């Protein structure tokens, strides 16, 4: 899903490859990119399930406004994955509901 | 607590321009933005701008952002990136909270907050994409056209394989073209109105690329369990009602919604600024005068947050709001007044184009109302 070559933006710049653990699965990421970018590149589209009806949610605004892409990151719930950059060894989990108290 | 002359919310074209004007006059200014990368939505505009040279015609938005940022940094504008404003209290005490943790490997805990004491505030928080409600509208894969644009042009990731674009205004047309440039297939653009809303030059490029533009069509539903697997559209009649028997299904995994923007008025509302409804400006807008001051003295608005327009008008409004917010118009000398008048003239020129619709009239009506001593909310 990565856009390696682009007619206006050119070749994708070099970036250090790091790894995340997403619901136990190892996902490669480019250093500096948002968590949501790494997930989209890996084909992961569901970020969380809503509290009342357990409906799936994915990226909606991609600029930190809507919180639809919130996930549990390193044990902390409600992290907006579209504005939070990846870090090597980061643990990302699909969020169910609004998160437990211990995750806030 | 930090003391500043002007606190600016948003580091897009309006906010950066405001920061630059304050810093030029020797003022202490801080620009707060929740994104780590400043520039607002200019950073995903990889097309060349139209208009006059004075307004960056022929320059790509992403390059305009870089120029603004360079100027702001050279002038000593303080940028607080990865932080966001959550309260504006009486007397312009502004509370900010860290939105993006410094150490992304950190663990759960309270996000740090800070308070600013500002003489005035410029709200340049931009716009939000309008939503469109239809069956399946919350499935993963239904996203704003602007979101898809961020994915392809900033993140360099495809949102999916095949897209249905809903809306043939300029955003729908431009993002469709950029999706094609990114190697994504666009099955069709649908538009509920009987005519394409955006520029003919953009629509022609799309058609040449082989993407059908179906006017008088609406989306009935998105199909899929958790993620989008398809979309069903139908033709609409003269009263916008779907015509039975005209349903068509598209095999798509992404549905982009490009049905307009509305001003981000959250902080203006929180601060007690009076809002007025202006369809030409995108919906609820903080009432403001010709100097962009809202009904709360010392709180100014600029850019899309003051009514949906273009990046070029956002830049000019940002400059104007920066000058007005810093000077508070008490101590403006003749030179300052001439500068303000020149910006107001340029804004009027920008709003005089054939595609600007009722924007000039709407702004003028708003600012005339805002000119009288603003009624309290």
Image (tube, coloured by chain):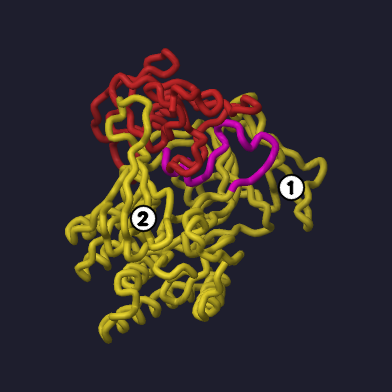
- Asked whether B267 or B131 is in front, the reply is B267
Question: In x, y percent, where is residue B299?
Answer: 41, 65
Question: In x, y percent, where is residue B240?
Answer: 75, 53
- Asked whether A36 or B205 is in front, the reply is A36
Magenta residues span: B131-151
Q: Residue at x 47, y 60 (%)?
A: B305
Q: Which mark is residue B235?
A: 1
Disc 2 is placed on an element classified as loop
Label 1: how many Cα within 10 Å (few below 14, some 14–19, many 20+): many
Q: Where on the picture, by quarter, is residue A53? A: top right
Please tell me the colour of chain A.
red
Q: Residue at x 52, y 69 (%)?
A: B287
Furthest residue to the right? B244
Question: In x, y percent, where is residue A84?
Answer: 36, 34
Report if residue B135 lies within the magenta region. yes
The chain coloured yellow is: B
* Label 2 sits on residue: B12
Q: Is residue B53 visible?
A: no
């Amino acid at each position: 899903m990565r856009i390696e070559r682009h007619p206006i933006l050119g070749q994708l710049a070099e970036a250090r490859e790091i790894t995340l653990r997403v619901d136990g699965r190892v996902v490669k990421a480019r250093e500096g990119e948002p968590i949501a970018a790494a997930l989209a590149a890996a084909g992961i589209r569901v970020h969380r399930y809503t509290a009342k009806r357990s409906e799936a949610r994915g990226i909606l605004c991609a600029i930190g406004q809507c919180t639809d892409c919130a996930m549990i990151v390193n044990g902390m719930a409600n992290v907006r994955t579209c504005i939070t950059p990846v870090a090597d060894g980061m643990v990302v989990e699909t969020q169910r509901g609004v998160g437990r108290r211990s995750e806030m | 607590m930090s003391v500043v002359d002007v606190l600016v919310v948003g580091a897009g074209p309006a906010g950066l321009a405001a920061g630059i004007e304050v810093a030029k006059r020797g003022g202490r200014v801080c620009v707060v933005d929740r994104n780590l990368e400043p520039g607002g939505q200019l950073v995903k505009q990889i097309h060349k701008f139209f208009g006059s040279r004075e307004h960056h015609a022929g320059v790509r938005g992403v390059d305009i952002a870089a120029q603004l940022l360079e100027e702001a940094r050279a002038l000593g504008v303080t940028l607080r990136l990865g932080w966001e404003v959550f309260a504006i209290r009486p007397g312009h005490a502004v509370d900010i909270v860290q939105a993006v943790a410094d150490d992304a490997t950190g663990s759960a805990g309270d996000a740090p907050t800070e308070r600013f004491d500002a003489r005035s505030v410029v709200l340049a928080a931009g716009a939000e994409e309008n939503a469109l409600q239809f069956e399946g509208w919350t499935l993963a894969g239904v996203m704003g056209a602007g979101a898809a644009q961020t994915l392809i042009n900033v993140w360099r990731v495809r949102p999916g394989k095949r897209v249905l674009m809903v809306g043939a205004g300029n955003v729908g047309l431009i993002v469709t073209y950029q999706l094609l440039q990114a190697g994504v297939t666009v099955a069709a653009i649908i538009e509920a109105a009987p005519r394409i809303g955006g520029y003919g030059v953009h629509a022609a490029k799309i058609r040449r690329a082989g993407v059908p533009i179906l006017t008088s069509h609406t989306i009935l539903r998105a199909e899929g369990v958790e993620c989008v697997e398809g979309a069903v559209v139908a033709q609409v009649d003269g009263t916008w009602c779907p015509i039975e028997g005209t349903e068509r299904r598209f095999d798509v995994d992404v549905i982009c919604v490009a049905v307009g923007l509305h001003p981000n008025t959250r902080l203006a509302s929180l601060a007690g600024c009076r809002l007025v409804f202006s369809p030409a400006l995108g919906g609820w807008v903080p009432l403001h005068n010709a100097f962009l001051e809202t009904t709360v003295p010392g709180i100014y608005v600029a850019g899309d947050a003051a009514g949906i327009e273009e990046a070029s008008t956002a830049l000019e409004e940002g400059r104007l709001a920066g000058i007005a917010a810093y000077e508070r118009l008490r101590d403006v000398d003749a030179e300052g007044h001439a500068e303000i008048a020149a910006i107001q003239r340029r804004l009027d020129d920008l709003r005089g184009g054939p595609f600007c619709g009722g924007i000039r009239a709407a702004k003028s009506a708003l600012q005339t109302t805002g000119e009288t001593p603003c009624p309290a909310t």
